[in-house]
């Protein structure tokens, strides 16, 4: 064999197949070609994928190393078998990296998942050798994307043996097997949740400023909605579309009010807006990414085919008049296909997308009464080593106007001490029934503060004591 001739032939073939950079060589463990799992293909309606690199797009062809050194004029028979969800397309050819060394016979099995053909070494100074690479060019069909396409190839002594497959007549060292086409999800939606704190010192009207959260706006989560790199570190940054080009969100996702959206569930009763921001904080709102808030408990972002890359923040702005509640948020991508007969898209999530906690203590006396002849009292205790400020808020039934004395609606509970007061010192009148709800917030950890509401009938000495409740615990 002439080494120089072999090297020249290899170089010529390499130039011929320059578009085949992503070919899956199943003999060497090369990466398969990743196509979009969302492609709709069935046995009744197969889809033809562009797997021909000569088309000038990023696609793939099936390659393998021969694994056997031929003698002059020797003839063997190749069998190429792939998974049942695959069919070899019409118009395919088999080529070698050394085209001057081989002649391929007629190809049998086009339209099925098994090909057979003869391989004749032309001999003389240039035989087929084990290191030679054969490649099948052309486009092929798939009948489903639920499992990857795995192929195996081998050489046999007789054509009947190649047709049958198995071990009988198989040439030693000529068997290669591996993944050829792989199907992966093209997109994903993820959320990294954060915790914001409603500040007790403002009666929970503001957030506690920390990191990227300000008094007015809380950063509740970091989102990513984007295409997925199917091989993490390989040549592809997204799965291939049917035509062999990289798929896009615009290919997959419907836009507009009825298109793909992210729906956030949680308590938005205190919010003026929910929006998305770039830069990993809430300082740079993204145009068109302000949510529609409905029912006080749902915020909807119409994202469509707009990617949200790393560094996208989910933010909420408070209204300054409604107490910020303790709440958790979840977010779900509701996927709507841009081409329902071509691509099947599915939802992602719901994912945790932030929480709001409170940094102090809230105590409630749900029913405070001031009937004539009775004493109505509240006792607060502080077991901590620091004096704590408290504030009182009074709410009542619709139509009942409650008069209060603002001067007596705040104060201090001493360290390791108690504070006792009559309710008529801050509730001074009613327009209807003599009853109300009293809410007390204390700038202290909740495990240091306790409260008791008491009503006494001094005429007969009867006493009714009620431990003040903590929201969410009763």
Image: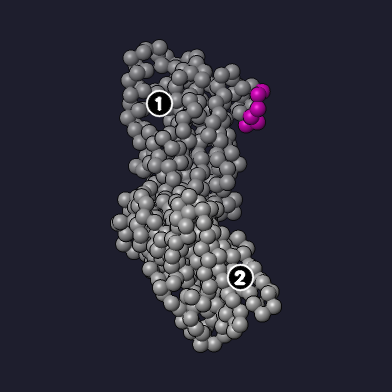
Residue drawn 52% across the image and 56% down it: 417
Q: Is residue 222 visible?
A: yes
Residue drawn 38% across the image and 68% down it: 320
**Label 1 packing within 10 angstroms: few (<14), some (14-19), many (20+):** many
Query: Any magenta on residue 386?
Result: no
Q: Which residues are magenta?
A: 163-168
Position of residue 185 measured from the top left corner of the image (x, y, whole percent): 49, 47
Q: Nearer the viewer, residue 108 or 463?
A: 463
Left or right of 381? Residue 100 is: left
SS of the residue under disc 2: strand
| Residue named by callout 1 | 97
What is the quadrant of residue 391 in the picture? bottom left
SS of the residue under disc 1: loop
The N terminus - image quarter: top left
Position of residue 309 measured from the top left corner of the image (x, y, whole percent): 37, 50
Left or right of 362? Residue 163 is: right
Residue drawn 51% across the image and 43% down it: 183
Q: Nearer the viewer, residue 251 or 113?
A: 251
| Residue named by callout 2 | 454
Q: How is the image coloured?
A: one colour
The C terminus - image quarter: bottom right
Q: Nearer the viewer, residue 19 or 224?
A: 224
Q: Nearer the viewer, residue 65 or 110?
A: 65
Position of residue 404 measured from the top left corner of the image (x, y, whole percent): 45, 78
């Amino acid at each position: 064999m002439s080494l120089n001739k072999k090297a020249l032939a290899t170089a010529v073939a390499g130039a011929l197949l320059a578009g085949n950079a992503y070919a899956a060589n199943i003999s060497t463990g090369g990466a398969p070609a990743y196509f979009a799992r969302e492609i709709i293909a069935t046995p009744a309606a197969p889809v033809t994928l562009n797997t021909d690199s000569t088309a000038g797009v990023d696609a793939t062809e099936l390659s393998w190393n021969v694994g056997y050194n031929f003698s002059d004029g020797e003839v063997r028979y190749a069998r190429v078998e792939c998974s049942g969800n695959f069919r070899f397309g019409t118009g395919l050819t088999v080529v070698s990296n050394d085209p001057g060394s081989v002649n391929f016979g007629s190809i049998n099995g086009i339209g099925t998942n098994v090909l057979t053909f003869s391989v004749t070494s032309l001999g003389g100074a240039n035989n087929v050798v084990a290191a030679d690479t054969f490649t099948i060019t052309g486009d092929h069909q798939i009948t489903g994307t639920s499992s990857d396409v795995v192929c195996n190839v081998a050489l046999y002594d007789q054509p009947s043996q190649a047709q049958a497959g198995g071990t009988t007549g198989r040439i030693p060292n000529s068997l290669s097997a591996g993944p050829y086409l792989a199907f992966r999800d093209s997109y994903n939606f993820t959320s990294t949740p954060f915790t914001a704190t409603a500040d007790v010192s403002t009666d929970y009207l503001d957030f506690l400023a920390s990191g990227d959260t300000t008094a007015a706006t809380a950063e509740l989560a970091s989102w990513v909605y984007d295409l997925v790199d199917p091989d993490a570190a390989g040549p592809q940054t997204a799965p291939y579309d049917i035509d062999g080009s990289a798929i896009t969100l615009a290919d997959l996702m419907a836009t507009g009010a009825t298109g793909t959206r992210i729906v956030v569930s949680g308590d938005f009763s205190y919010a003026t807006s929910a929006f998305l921001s770039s830069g990993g904080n809430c300082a740079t709102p993204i145009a068109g990414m302000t949510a529609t808030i409905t029912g006080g408990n749902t915020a909807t972002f119409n994202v469509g085919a707009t990617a949200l890359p790393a560094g996208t923040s989910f933010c909420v702005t408070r209204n300054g008049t409604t107490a910020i509640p303790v709440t958790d948020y979840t977010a779900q991508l509701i996927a709507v296909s841009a081409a329902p007969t071509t691509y099947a898209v599915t939802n992602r999530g719901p994912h945790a997308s932030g929480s709001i906690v409170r940094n102090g203590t809230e105590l409630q006396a749900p029913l405070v009464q001031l009937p004539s002849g009775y004493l109505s009292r509240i006792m607060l205790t502080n077991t901590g080593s620091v004096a704590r400020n408290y504030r009182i808020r009074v709410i009542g039934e619709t139509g009942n106007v409650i008069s209060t004395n603002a001067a007596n609606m705040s104060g201090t509970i001493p360290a390791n001490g108690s504070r006792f007061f009559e309710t008529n010192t801050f509730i001074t009148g009613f327009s209807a029934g003599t009853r109300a709800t009293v809410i007390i917030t204390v700038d202290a950890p909740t495990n240091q503060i306790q409260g008791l509401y008491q009503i006494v009938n001094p005429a007969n000495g009867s006493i009714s004591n009620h431990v003040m409740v903590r929201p969410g615990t009763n």
